[in-house]
Image: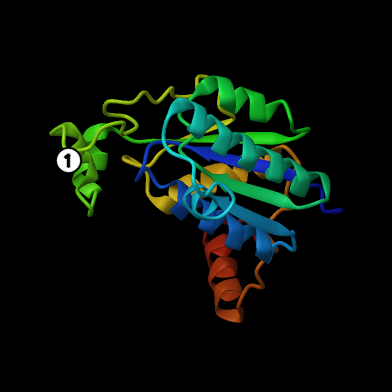
Amino acid sequence: MANKGFTIWFTGLSGSGKTTLAKKIERELLTRGLGVEMLDGDVVRTNLSKGLGFSKEDRDTNIRRIGFVANLLARNGAVCICAAISPYKDIRDEVRHLHQDFVEIYTECSLDALTERDTKGLYKKALAGEITGFTGVDDPYEAPEDAEITVNTETESIDQSLDTIMAHLESKGLVPPAPQQDMSADEETAILAKLKTLNFV
């Protein structure tokens, strides 16, 4: 299977599991022989978007830059994985229209769960008014209504979410199936014995 470039775009609130899942997907795709590049929102901000603030205009500029780079990579045969809050629907749609193949993944998680798992205490500070302009608290997050994939990281394990994502990518022909694992002699014997008890062999 030729390496066809496309973009996987994770969107969701801070702490919802975007980067964790993106790294899992990256490792999985590498094992399947695909060329993969990852653009993490926080990393991009310190390099490509250094100096931008958190106004809507600056947030949009940051997402446009990530989308532009992702499209360049995808056009050149890479699978580009982007993990960015990207809170506004209009700019996500704008980025989508740059791409020939674009898979949006919404990492859904409630504010209560995010506050509970937040080791830095940023949500509590935002809810208390100590931090302003915090996405999902006093700055809007517009959840996708038509994302290709929605995973709920509050109710699902990381591996369950990973399986959902990989099943979709395989079903669309974007990634090859996982390589078959060789069965051990003991496993083969056990399966054969079970089949015999069921009168299948």
- Residue 18 or 192: which is nearer the viewer? 18
In the shown orientation, is residue 49 left or right of residue 170? left
Instruction: Establish if 25 lies above or below 134.
Output: below
Residue drawn at (67%, 29%) of the image: 96
In this figure, which residue is indicated by the disc labeled 1? Answer: 125
User: Where in the figure is residue 63, as x and y percent of width and height?
Assistant: 57, 36
Amino acid at circle 1: Lys
Residue found at the very far bottom of the displayed protein:
185
Label 1, residues with CA under 10 Å away: few <14, some 14-19, many ≥20: some
Q: Is residue 117 visible?
A: yes
Outermost residue on the left side: it is 128
* Picture coordinates of residue 40, whole percent (x, y): 53, 51
Can residue 198 be seen? no
Image quarter hosting the N terminus:
bottom right
> Residue drawn at (54%, 51%), measured in percent from left and top?
44
Q: Nearer the viewer, residue 78 or 176?
A: 78
